[in-house]
Image: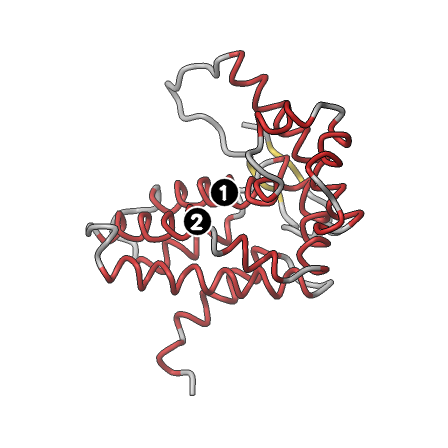
Amino acid sequence: MTVLTLGEASPLVSRTMATPAAAAGDEPEDLWVRRRRLVASDMEQAAVHLLAERGYENVTANDLADACGISVRTFFRYFNAKRDVLLAMPRRALTNLCDAVEARPADEALLTAWREAAVGGNYFDETDVRLAADYRTIMAAEPQLLEFVNGDPELVDRFAVTTARRLGIDPDDLRSRVVGAVIRGAMTAAMSRWTSSESGELVGLFGEAFDLLDDLGSIG
């Protein structure tokens, strides 16, 4: 397992963080799949950096392709549209986070499972850490992009599905949708604070958000 130690200046998480690793017994990653993943990671970093530098609305898909040193046709083989560059990191991180939630002890309370997984920070990989500062810059400059990202149907559904699995109910059950939306809302509020402020680590803000959910009944 690769261990990545982040300095105090990291805007994402300031602690020793373990990169998600394949489970014991998993087959080695196919070389073609690995190459494609690494190329996509390099492209994502170059593209996100350009978006942070110039502003989302001022950059075209052609500009992103140029920044990656490829043709726009090749760019679209990896990303369906410019907006998908911004969705790659949240989708990747949420997949890892939900895997962590589902791996929590079966007898653990739902909010506790989500909180412990969220504050662990192990769902951010090396690419996410390198992207953090640029991602924060983009969202701070254009807050509506955070709403776009957090409203992504794939992310919304994953919160409901993971919550349903913890509760042992159907993902379309109203409880899955409501509770999943509440948890997503808490994490979205934490991300909003993170992108709009120079202080605060994201995982720490996640912890504060879940603490508020625990105290929800006594607030006001």
What's the residue at 68%, 37% (across, down)? Answer: 61
Q: Nearer the viewer, residue 1 or 63?
A: 63
Left or right: 15, with 104 as reference point? right
Residue linked to disc 1: 91
Q: Is residue 134 above or below residue 72?
A: below
Chain-order first, disc 2 or disc 1 = 1
Marks 2 and 1 close (CB-CB < 8 Å): yes
* Residues at marks 2 and 1, CA–CA distance in whole angstroms: 7 Å
Extreme-right residue of the structure: 53
**Mark carried by residue 155:** 2
Spot occupied by residue 140 in the image (x, y as percentages of width and height): 70, 60
Left or right: 30, with 196 as reference point? left
Amino acid type, mark 2: Leu
Q: Nearer the viewer, residue 74 or 204?
A: 74
What's the residue at 75%, 41% (across, down)? Answer: 49
Color style of the picture: secondary structure
What's the residue at 70%, 37% (across, down)? Answer: 47
At label 2, counting other C-alpha atoms closer than 10 Å, the crowd grade (few under 14, some 14-19, many 20 or more) is some
**Mark carried by residue 219:** none
| Quarter occupied by the N terminus | top right
Left or right: 108, with 62 as reference point? left
Helix, strand or loop under label 2: helix
Helix, strand or loop under label 1: helix
Spot occupied by residue 218 in the image (x, y as percentages of width and height): 38, 83
| Quarter occupied by the C terminus | bottom left
Amino acid type, mark 1: Arg
